[in-house]
Amino acid sequence: MKRILDRVREFTEARRIMAMGLYPYFRPIESEQGATVTMDGREVVMMGSNNYLGLTNHPEVKKASQEAIDRYGTGCAGSRFLNGTLRIHMECEAALAHYMRTESALVYSTGFTTNQGVIASLTGRDTHVFIDRSDHASIIDAVRLSFGKDIKFNHNDMEDLEKRLQLYPDKPKMIVIDGVFSMEGDIAPLDKIAELAETYDADVLVDDAHAIGVLGDNGRGTASHFGVEDKIAGTIGTFSKSLASIGGFFTASEEIIHYLKHHSRALIFSASPPPASMAAVIKAIEIIEREPERIERLWTLTNYLKKGLEEYGFNIGHCETPIIPVYVGDNLKVFEACIRLQEEGVFVNPVVAPAVPADQSLLRLSLMSTLTEEHLDFAISKLVKVGEEVGFIEAKINR
Ligand code: PMP
């Protein structure tokens, strides 16, 4: 009979890649996550962080976190529901609701658990949950955890979504999508999704992990970008990207938040996020509102990098945001490229199946507003060198 440890021993793939010297995961960074980072004692240009607005090492953000530790200590020792609500959690929720122009907000300990806590508790046994095939793993897991039925539609394919919505006229329906898709960097057509939702009586939730601080008025996200803020039921977000910390949040009407506070298991049965994180978020929001030029700068750099990569013939798909995929289409080549790029002084992330279909493996580049055009020129030149070497762009004489 099979034992559970058999599956552990049978997993040899990662060790095979390690033996080849091509393992690109768990690479330690020895400094704060700025435009450049230190790895193995060397400076490397950071082209793979989600610190979009460069706020995780902003002096004011760090100071606010330090002051919160001095006042409240390092942890909360309980869940929001019982002894883990500190005054600073409520201040953070008020700041989030104000920033997002919603009635209420609720903080969770990560973006991952926010999806679990929100989706699973709003979904009943007869709820049909429509999810994009490229939705983030935390959405897919949340639907699995819920009692609802999951229905996947093809990535950003509105005809496919409509066909599937038509099949269940009498069921409660919820559509959950990434506002900005975390691997491909494209944007969900939320205006069309909101229209379909209205026609077929569905409620829409948007996971804006990669859109907050990036898209829409003052970085308020995808619904703001499309002018449909009043047509969505709620927005899920994370603090681990533009908001310079760790944790997650949900913004919605007071009625929905009230319900979640009394039904959301990921909230009620898990400890609340630490005070230092709350203080960082409050300060990050203040800076984002005070310095909109950070978002402008992020977009200037995005356009600069996209143009540069296209000029050299890289396949960057339909990316529309500071997440820029460079399609390679072969896992081993992706791994080799990551390792070689780090040796050449550039950090990028590998993305292979199952995060993307196997023939669409890619190098995921993501930008920070604190990078410079010189950093990007350097990164492009190294991508060209490694791309020719590994064979994901064609070598051109006299380039
Ligand atoms: N949703 C999306 C779209 C994400 O990309 C991520 C994280 N990468 C999450 C949720 C989870 O957020 P967190 O890292 O805060 O758990």
Image (cartoon, rainbow, N blue to C red):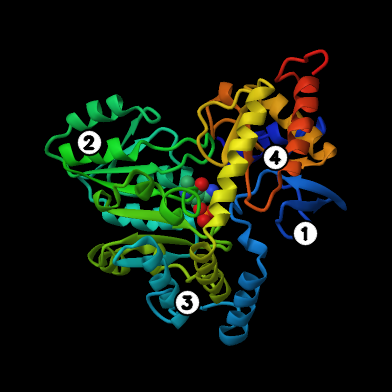
User: Camera-side residue: 39 or 17?
Assistant: 39
* Relative image position of residue 256 (x, y in whole percent): 26, 62
Tell me whether the residue at label 1 lies in contact with that at label 2, contact meaning CB atoms closer than 8 angstroms: no
How far is mark 4 from mark 1, CA to CA?
Answer: 16 Å
Disc 4 residue type (three-letter): Val
Q: Earlier in the sequence, mark 4 or mark 2?
A: 2
Q: Secondary structure at mark 1?
A: loop
How far is mark 1 from mark 2, CA to CA?
Answer: 47 Å
Location of residue 9 with respect to 41 vertically, above or below: above
Location of residue 52 with respect to 265 vertically, above or below: above
Q: Which residue is mark 2?
A: 196
Query: Would you say residue 241 is visible in this rendering?
Result: no
The disc at residue 322 is none
Q: Secondary structure at mark 4?
A: loop
Q: Earlier in the sequence, mark 4 or mark 1?
A: 1
Residue at horizontal 37%, vertical 68%? 98
Tell me whether the residue at label 4 lies in contact with that at label 1, contact meaning CB atoms closer than 8 angstroms: no
Q: Which residue is mark 1?
A: 31
Q: Secondary structure at mark 3?
A: loop
Q: Earlier in the sequence, mark 4 or mark 3?
A: 3
Q: Which residue is mark 4?
A: 348
Disc 2 residue type (three-letter): Leu
